[in-house]
Amino acid sequence: MAAEFVTSAASARDLPREPVAELVFAGRSNVGKSSVINALARQPLARTSAAPGKTRLANFYRLRPERGAAFHLVDLPGYGYARGDREGRAFEPLVQEYFFGGPAQRQLRPAIAGVVLLIDARHPGLASDLEAAGWFAAHGCAVRLAATKVDKLSRADRQRADAAIRRAFGVDALMMSAQTGEGIEELWVWIAQQVEQWKQPSR
């Protein structure tokens, strides 16, 4: 598989216009989006940091698997935290522009094939995660809920987290660890399905 960085976007005018499917990675700051992307790419593609709020742009990566079409992984800025912004909403304009092209637009970006919503398995049911899940569902996005950092949980804590996530979100989460590789292949299967089902918009 080939993988490479494409570009970083600060606004709608910076977004790629290539007719390829896009898989969006969304989640709270420091939930481990970049680590999961690196595990999927099998190389240090995305920059990781222990400091929350590190990803401040929408970063695009092109992945070309051995089978199937090439597609973009889109690492969105984490929500719930921003330096100098107590409400954690500093990145909302960029996310709005990515999904809709601007505040006045209502049509979802046609390149989006699916959204991977990452939550921290140690903190199931956070209000911001529930709000994000509801927002994606309301806009018709295909969403795969994935719980990261399960390697940091004991077996009993993992069972409790799994049940708590199911109660909070109404669906099961894919339990994942970028450190051990758990869940990576299962996520690949879902991504491949979304890319295969994606239809290029007619001009």
Image: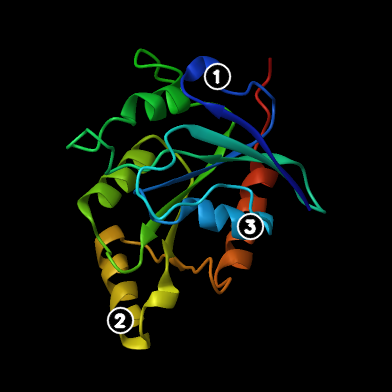
The amino acid marked with disc number 2 is Asp
Residue at screen point 17% across, 37% down: 86
158 to 101, vertically: above or below:
below
185 to 84, vertically: above or below:
below
Cα distance, mark 3 to mark 1?
25 Å
Residue 132: x and y in percent read: 32, 44
Residue at screen point 42% across, 22% down: 97
Residue 44: x and y in percent read: 64, 54
Residue 12: x and y in percent read: 49, 18
Mark 3 — residue?
40
Residue at screen point 25% across, 47% down: 128
Mark 2 — residue?
157
Quadrant containing the C terminus is: top right
Q: Residues within 10 Å of mark 3 (few under 14, many from 20)?
A: many
Cα distance, mark 2 to mark 1?
42 Å
Dot 2 or dot 1, earlier in sequence: 1
Q: Residues within 10 Å of mark 1 (few under 14, many from 20)?
A: few
Residue at screen point 32% across, 39% down: 135
The mark lying in front, picked from 2 and 1, is: 1
> What label does residue 14 carry, if any?
1
Q: How is the image coloured?
A: rainbow
